[in-house]
Amino acid sequence: MQISIHPKAKKVLMLLGAIAIQSIAIFAVYPLFENSRSVGITDTSPDAQAAIDAATAFYTLDYTANPDLWATRICALTTEAGCRAIHAFFAPSVQAMVQENKVQTGCTVVPVRLVSDKSHLRVWQVSVAIINPWQGLEDPKQDAFVEVENVNGLWLMNRILFQQEVSNFLTPTP
Amino acid sequence: MRLKYCILLVVLILASFVVNLVAHAQGEQPPQDGLWGDVIDENGNILYDNLTDLGEIQVDAEWMPNVPFINGQATYHRYLTPSGNIVVMPSATTLFFMALNPDESGFEQASAGLGNGLGALETMLAGYISPADMAAMGYSDPNSFWQSVIDGQTNIWTMEVMGDFFRDLLTSSLADQNLYTMLLLYTNGNCDAVPGGCPPGRVLPTPIPPSSACPAPFIQTGPTQVTGGSGDGGKIAPPNPVVIGQDPERRGVDVKVNALIPPVSYHTFETIRHDDLVCASDSTGLGSGCPGHVRDPRWKTVVHTWYECIEHIQVFSDYLASAQVSINLTPESRAWILTDLAQAYPGAHLLHPDFSFSFAGPGSLLGDKSVSWTTTIPSIQTADPGNYTTTVTVRTTGTPVSAPRQARVGIGQFTVELVQVTLIEQP
């Protein structure tokens, strides 16, 4: 038996299918972000927004979640090199801390200022406030320095700079 | 960027040559220094088949860089050598910061390896910090520059090139997750210095425990018990036997013998080594902390080794191999027959003074693994009057842990009567 579908009906079905898949994906992913709020300020530049989104993903932590999910979410907002650094360097440290402290938190990220601008490579200072601080965390609000890179017109995070690196930005230039 | 990445890879490959050279140099030293002998062959290849993979570990390290809210962690792959040494392969990123902080990271305390952080820093940062950069900072001698970096007099973090370097470093460390550029070797027992400490339970090869740690194996058993029937000498019937020559029924004597062979217990002691991780104060102030004093540099974790003796008892049955029952007229009775009786009855002599009966095993196994054996010898044709001794000889088969045993036990005497006629003169 052969079933023939009218081309228009086929398009409608495909459209409905795509909508259904999108809906499922949104409902599946939404809970991960429900504690996190990226603060989009008026006229936020794309590079600042990239830094905000990436930092938000970076500090949205859940010890009950699949460890790979954390890196996967961030990698959607990073450059290829940034994703590799997340997997190779940051993921072990973050997972160790998250598991040790049973961390389950989102964060609020507010852009502070652009501290370095090399055209396609910029560093944004953002203020990160942990919504559900874990025991032992002395200061739930700290500044992070997020390096973003423009890749084919899209701003993506390279990495969050090490604390030791940011002295250049903290010391006022005479 | 691509150029620097390529340079970094080349540098890392070169660095691995440095390892080989170092290892090779170590291997050429006398046996005492032949630490690398079971790690790297003469061609500089790592002998993975020789090594026990202790896996990769991440440990909190204050000397590793950190980002807000997240402490820095060092990553190592560690291997145990057949001689109990621990080979540590830091990840490329970890290695860089170890070299930058050689004291805090334990880099300087490695028993063998690069020796100091100068070479590592210079190797890894080649292509990023040029002699011209150093000269601009007032250093004519590269070694002075790197030493200054290690000593904290020159702040390497403020250098603009470091951003590119870290980006490449972190990326390249993923390009090959097993890209390890240097080997550090920590000798057996040097747990405090090993990054991450000694892994519990499987660190050091088990040393031979002190000879006094546990008792030596020993065997325990009891004597073979031999008993007879209810009467003396094992006799069970008749109550008053007479020589068969005077008994029209030639009844003789019934003798019963019992033997009980106790089992053999073999006691052995299993020596179990315990390596307990305990807290100890660290007078150097560089301790890695311990449970209850997490990350407290005044404390460190040390291994307390002690031995537990667990006794194992195996019980073996010792079966009967053979038994012999000897019934013999006593020497006194023999003399009496040949003297006194011969005077009354001229021609009296010994007819059958000795009896011997042989039996085979194995006997019957009892619940406690003892072996029991019983026999009754009926109608022993005792022709000579007097006292008879009964002697039982028991031989066992032995056990896997003990030799065959023999027991010879006398179970007493019984008497065989002679009815004598006394002539009485009539008045």
Image: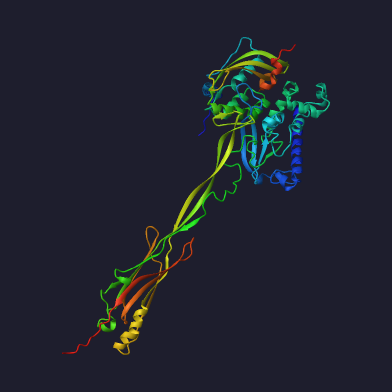
Q: Nearer the viewer, residue B2 or B256?
A: B256
**How is the rendered protein coloured?**
rainbow
Residue at x 74% of width, y 26% of height: B151
Q: Nearer the viewer, residue A122 or A80?
A: A122
Is residue A144 in view? yes
The x and y percentages for residue B419 are 25, 82
- Image check: B87 left or right of A9? right
Residue B155 falls in image quadrant? top right
Residue extending farthest top: A42
Residue at x 73% of width, y 16% of height: A119
Above or below: residue B279 compared with residue B152: below
Q: Nearer the viewer, residue B417 or A112?
A: B417
The x and y percentages for residue A75 are 62, 25
Residue B182 falls in image quadrant? top right
The x and y percentages for residue B52 are 63, 43
Residue A15 falls in image quadrant? top right
Above or below: residue B60 compared with residue B407: above
The x and y percentages for residue B233 are 33, 72
